[in-house]
């Protein structure tokens, strides 16, 4: 159970699963992923959702924005919404 007073911010970050080098050839196993988590004031985090970016189709981003607006918690985004990525 997480107390509201323990929450520092909501975070939405992206990564490519299985890709260690920027120049590495992207394969079907290397898919763009989204992580939605709650960052706590003590530095810990609680992951809410890890999902493929294509499968999310913007739903996770929309939910994160709505939660941030409703709770008045800050939302950290690691990139802008207009960022273009090959989703495979």
Image (cartoon, rainbow, N blue to C red):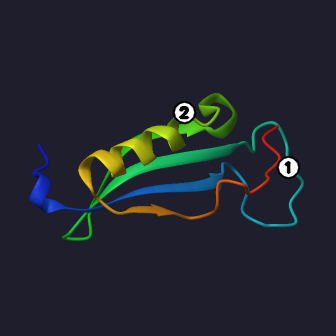
Left or right for 11, reference 8: right
Q: How many marks?
A: 2
Q: Regarding mark 1 in the picture, which secondary structure is present there?
A: loop
Q: Which mark is residue 65?
A: none
Residue plotted at (69% across, 34% down): 54
Which quadrant: the C terminus? top right
Left or right for 50, reference 87: left
Left or right for 59, reference 2: right
Give the quadrant of residue 20. bottom right
Please give the residue where the numbered disc 1 appears in the rendered image.
Answer: 26
Which quadrant: the N terminus? top left
Q: Is disc 1 surrounded by few (<14), some (14 to 19) or many (20+) residues within 10 Å?
A: some
Vertical placement of 43 versus 68: above or below? below
* Image coords of residue 2 (percent x, y): 14, 48
* Image coords of residue 68 (percent x, y): 35, 51
Give the quadrant of residue 83. bottom right
* Image coords of residue 32 (percent x, y): 69, 46
The answer to whether the residues at label 1 and label 2 have Cβ atoms under 8 Å apart is no
Q: Regarding mark 2 in the picture, which secondary structure is present there?
A: helix
Give the camera-side residue of 66 and 36: 66
Give the camera-side residue of 25 and 7: 7
Residue plotted at (50% across, 48% down): 35
Pick whichever of labels 1 and 2 is earlier in the sequence.
1
Q: Residue furthest bottom?
A: 42
Give the quadrant of residue 48. top left
Left or right for 17, reference 71: right
* Image coords of residue 59 (percent x, y): 54, 33
Q: CA distance from mark 1 to mark 2?
A: 24 Å
Please give the residue where the numbered disc 2 appears in the rendered image.
Answer: 59
Vertical placement of 23 versus 87: above or below? below
Q: Is disc 2 surrounded by few (<14), some (14 to 19) or many (20+) residues within 10 Å?
A: few
């Amino acid at each position: 159970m997480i107390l509201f007073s323990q929450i520092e911010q909501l975070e939405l970050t992206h990564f490519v699963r299985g890709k260690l080098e920027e120049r590495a050839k992207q394969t079907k196993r290397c898919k763009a992923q989204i992580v939605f988590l709650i960052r706590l004031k003590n530095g810990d985090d609680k992951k809410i959702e890890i999902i493929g970016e294509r499968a999310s189709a913007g739903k996770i981003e929309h939910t994160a924005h709505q939660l941030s607006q409703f709770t008045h918690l800050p939302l950290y985004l690691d990139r802008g919404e207009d960022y273009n990525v090959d989703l495979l």
